[in-house]
Image: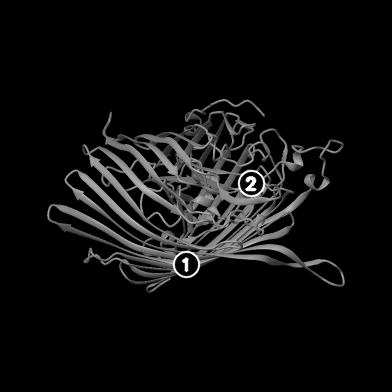
C-alpha cells in the first residue's frame, strides 16, 4: 500500500477562480446535524449544522462528523459505525421509518441515496431515553426532501434537473424532480438514476463495481393550518453491482490463494451480482399550535421492506412495521421552567432467510427463491423526560420502559426493563456551557447475521444487552474574537460506555457454522472534539475522535477499532460573484491491537483529501455548476472501522466530479 502523507492545498488556488455570478442558492446541499458540532450561543440546546455538497455515497456525507464512520469501498457494502459500534447496534431511520436487520457480512444492510436527502440528524452516543429503542451507540436519522424545501417564496410550482459525472468508474447520473402547491396540498415527485462501470483504487487496481442505482420518491403533505399537517410518502430504492464474489472482499485482486496455490477455489476469483432493494412507506402527523405551549404532537406510522442479494442469489428479506407518538409541553412552575417530553414507540420486524430455490422442471433454470426460516421480534416502549431549567442549570431526568419479545428459531422469550437517564448542563457564562450525561441502555437479542441462521444457533439462556453510557464535556462559542465579523466555537467530550454483554454472530466454538452468543462484558472509551473559526465568509474546522473497545474478560478488542481520526476543513464564499469552495482532509493514524491470543490486527495510517468549487451564474437564474475532486492525491487506503480489514477492497482512488443542476 502506498505511504500516505498529510497535505493541504492552499485555499488561494480556488480563490484565484474569478467569474461573474450571483450568490449560489445552495441547490445541492445536505444539512448534517450532530451533537458533536458546537451549538449556537443563542440556543445551547441546539445542534450545529454543516452543509455537504456533491455526495455520491453516504461516506461523503458523514465523514466529517467526529465519532462517525462509514466504511466500504462501494455504496452497496457501506456500513455505519458510531464510536466503534456497528450499525446493528444503532437506531437508523429514514423519515422516521426504522431500518432493521443485519443481512450478511459480505454485503451492506441499508440502501440510501444521498441525492434525495435534505438533512441527516445524528446523536453520537445514547444520551437520552428518547434516542430510540435498542440504541446502544446512538442514532442516525435520514430526512428526505419536501416540496416546501424546494418551492421559492410566492411560487406554487417548480422543478429541478441535474446531471453528474464521475471519472473513476465513468459514472453518469441523471435526476429529475417536480413539486407544487395547490391550496393546502404540497406534492413532490422525484426520480434519480446513476450508472457506473468498474473504477480503480489508489494503487491503480480495478475495483469491480459495475452496476446502477435508481431511486424514486412521491410525497404529499396537507397543511391544516400553520404548524399542523399530515404527510404521506412512498420511496423505492434499488442498488445493483456486479462485483467480486464476496462483495466486500478483494477476491478478484488476488488476496486469496491464486491458481496453483494451496486452497485455490475458482469460484472465489469470479464475479457475482449483489443488490439492495428497499421500499419505505410513511405517514406522519404534527400539531404544534403557536398559542398553546402544552401541545406539540408528533406521530408517525411506517412500513419498510429490504431485500438483500449477493453471490448471485437472493439472501434475506426484512420487513418492519411500526409507529411512534410523542408530545412536548413547555411551562413554568415557580422558579423553574420545564420542557416535558412524553412518548412511545412500537415496531415489529419479520426477518426471512432464503435458503431454497425454485426451478423450472423442464429447463432446470432458477425461477425464484423460497424462505426456509422466518423470525420475528416485537418492541414496545414508553418514555418521559423533563428538561428543568433553574437559573444557570438545566437538569434533565428521564425514565424509559422497554418490552421486547424475541420469536426466533430456538428462542421464544420476552424481556423488559426500566432504564433511567440524567443530563446536567451548567451555563458558566453566556459563551461557556459544561455538561454531563448518564443513560442506561437496553437491547433485546436480535437475529444476528440472517444469512447464517440455522437450528441450534440461539440458546434459551440468551440475555439482552444492558449497560450504561456516561459522558462529560463542554461547549464554548464566542463572537468577535479579533474583529466584529469573526468567531470561535469548540465542543469537547470524554465518554465511557459499559455493556453487561454484547450479543453477536461469532464462530461456533464447537465447530460448524456460527452461533449468536454473548461476547461478555465490554467497555468502550474515547474522546471527541471539534473546533471552528470563522471570519466573514471564510470558515475552518478541525476535529479529533478516538474510540477503543475492550472485552473485560481478556482485554481483547470487541469491535473493529477505528483509530485516531483528525479532520480539517475550510470553506470560502465570494457572495458578490456567487462562488463557493471547500477543502477537507482526513488523517487516520495507524494502530495495532489484539483480537485473540494469536491474532494481531495492524492498520495502516492514511490521509485523504477532497475539494470542490461551485458557481451560480447571473445570466441563468437557478443554474449551478459544481466541480470536485475526491481523493486528490490518489491515496490507497481503507477505513479502519471496516470488518475483515485484511481482506476488504481498498477505497476508490482519485475521482473528478462534475455536476450541473437547474432549478426552475
Q: Is residue 335 left or right of residue 291?
A: left
> Which of the 4 image quarters holds residue 355?
bottom right
Note whether 362 is above or below 613 in the view shown.
Answer: below
> Percent position (x, y) of residue 100?
53, 58
Instruction: Classify residue 209 as left or right of residue 140.
Output: right
Q: CA distance from mark 2 to mark 1?
A: 30 Å
Q: Nearer the viewer, residue 555 or 110?
A: 555
Q: Could you say which is closer to the camera, residue 595 or residue 295?
A: 595
Q: Residue at x 27, y 35 (%)?
A: 478
What residue would you read off at disc 1? 322
Lateral position of residue 329 relative to residue 367, left or right: left
Q: Does the rendering let one see residue 334?
A: yes
Q: Can you tell which mark lies on residue 74? A: 2
Classify mark 1: helix, strand or loop.
strand
Mark 1 crowdedness (10 Å alpha carbons): few <14, some 14-19, many ≥20: many
Depth check, front residue: 178 or 64: 64
- Residue 280 appears in the picture as rendered: no
* Image quarter of residue 540: top left
Residue 631 point in image, percent of width and height: 59, 36
Q: Which label's residue is closer to the chain start, 2 or 1?
A: 2
Amino acid at each position: 500500500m502506498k505511504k500516505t502523507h498529510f497535505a493541504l492545498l492552499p485555499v488561494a488556488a480556488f480563490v484565484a477562480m474569478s467569474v461573474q455570478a450571483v450568490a449560489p442558492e445552495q441547490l445541492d446541499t445536505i444539512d448534517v446535524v450532530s451533537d458533536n458540532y458546537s451549538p449556537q450561543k443563542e440556543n445551547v440546546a441546539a445542534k450545529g449544522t454543516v452543509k455537504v455538497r456533491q455526495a455520491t455515497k453516504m461516506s461523503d456525507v458523514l465523514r466529517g462528523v467526529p465519532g462517525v464512520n462509514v466504511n466500504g469501498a462501494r455504496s452497496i457494502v457501506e456500513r455505519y459505525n458510531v464510536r466503534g459500534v456497528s450499525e446493528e447496534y444503532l437506531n437508523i431511520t429514514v423519515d422516521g421509518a426504522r431500518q432493521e436487520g443485519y443481512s450478511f457480512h459480505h454485503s451492506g444492510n441499508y440502501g440510501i441515496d444521498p441525492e434525495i436527502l435534505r438533512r441527516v440528524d445524528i446523536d453520537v452516543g445514547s444520551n437520552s431515553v428518547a434516542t430510540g429503542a435498542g440504541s446502544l451507540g446512538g442514532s442516525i436519522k435520514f430526512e428526505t426532501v419536501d416540496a416546501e424545501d424546494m418551492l421559492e417564496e410566492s411560487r406554487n410550482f417548480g422543478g429541478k434537473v441535474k446531471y453528474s459525472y464521475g471519472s473513476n468508474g465513468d459514472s453518469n447520473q441523471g435526476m429529475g424532480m417536480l413539486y407544487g402547491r395547490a391550496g393546502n396540498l404540497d406534492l413532490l415527485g422525484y426520480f434519480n438514476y446513476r450508472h457506473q462501470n468498474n473504477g480503480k483504487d489508489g494503487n491503480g487496481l480495478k475495483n469491480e463495481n459495475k452496476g446502477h442505482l435508481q431511486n424514486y420518491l412521491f410525497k404529499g403533505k396537507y397543511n391544516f393550518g400553520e404548524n399542523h399537517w399530515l404527510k404521506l410518502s412512498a420511496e423505492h430504492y434499488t442498488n445493483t453491482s456486479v462485483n467480486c464474489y464476496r462483495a466486500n472482499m478483494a477476491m478478484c485482486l488476488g488476496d486469496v490463494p491464486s491458481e496453483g496455490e494451496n486452497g485455490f477455489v475458482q469460484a472465489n476469483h469470479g464475479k457475482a451480482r449483489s443488490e439492495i432493494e428497499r421500499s419505505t412507506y410513511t405517514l406522519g402527523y404534527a400539531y404544534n399550535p403557536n398559542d398553546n405551549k402544552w401541545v406539540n404532537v408528533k406521530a408517525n406510522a411506517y412500513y419498510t421492506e429490504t431485500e438483500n442479494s449477493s453471490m448471485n442469489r437472493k439472501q434475506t428479506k426484512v420487513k418492519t412495521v411500526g409507529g411512534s407518538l410523542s408530545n412536548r409541553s413547555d411551562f413554568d412552575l415557580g422558579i423553574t421552567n420545564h420542557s416535558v417530553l412524553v412518548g412511545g414507540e412500537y415496531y415489529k420486524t419479520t426477518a426471512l432467510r432464503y435458503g431454497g430455490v425454485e426451478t423450472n422442471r423442464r429447463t432446470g433454470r432458477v425461477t425464484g427463491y423460497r424462505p426456509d426460516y422466518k423470525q420475528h421480534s416485537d418492541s414496545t416502549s414508553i418514555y418521559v423526560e423533563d428538561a428543568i431549567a433553574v437559573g444557570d442549570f438545566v437538569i434533565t431526568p428521564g425514565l424509559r420502559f422497554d418490552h421486547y419479545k424475541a420469536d426466533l428459531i430456538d428462542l421464544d422469550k420476552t424481556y423488559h426493563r426500566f432504564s433511567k437517564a440524567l443530563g446536567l448542563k451548567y451555563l458558566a457564562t453566556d459563551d461557556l456551557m459544561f455538561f454531563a450525561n448518564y443513560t442506561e441502555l437496553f437491547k433485546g437479542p436480535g437475529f444476528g447475521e440472517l444469512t447464517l441462521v440455522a437450528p441450534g444457533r440461539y440458546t434459551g439462556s440468551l440475555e439482552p444487552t444492558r449497560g450504561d453510557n456516561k459522558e462529560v464535556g463542554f461547549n464554548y462559542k464566542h463572537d468577535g474574537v479579533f474583529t466584529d465579523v469573526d468567531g470561535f466555537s469548540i465542543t469537547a467530550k470524554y465518554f465511557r460506555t459499559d455493556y453487561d454483554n454484547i450479543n453477536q454472530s461469532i464462530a461456533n466454538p464447537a465447530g460448524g457454522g456460527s452461533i449468536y452468543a454473548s461476547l461478555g462484558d465490554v467497555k468502550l472509551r474515547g474522546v471527541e472534539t471539534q473546533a471552528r473559526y470563522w471570519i466573514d465568509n471564510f470558515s475552518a474546522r478541525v476535529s479529533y475522535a478516538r474510540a477503543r473497545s475492550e472485552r473485560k474478560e481478556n482485554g481483547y478488542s470487541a469491535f473493529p477499532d477505528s483509530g485516531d481520526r483528525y479532520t480539517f476543513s475550510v470553506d470560502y464564499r465570494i457572495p458578490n460573484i456567487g462562488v463557493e469552495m471547500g477543502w477537507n482532509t482526513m488523517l487516520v493514524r495507524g494502530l495495532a491491537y489484539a483480537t485473540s491470543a494469536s491474532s494481531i490486527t495492524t492498520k495502516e495510517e492514511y490521509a485523504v483529501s477532497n475539494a470542490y468549487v461551485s458557481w451560480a451564474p447571473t445570466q441563468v437564474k437557478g443554474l449551478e455548476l459544481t466541480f470536485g475532486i475526491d481523493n486528490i492525491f490518489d491515496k490507497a487506503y481503507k477505513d479502519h472501522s471496516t470488518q475483515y480489514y485484511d481482506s476488504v477492497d481498498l477505497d476508490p482512488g482519485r475521482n473528478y466530479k462534475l455536476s450541473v443542476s437547474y432549478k426552475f
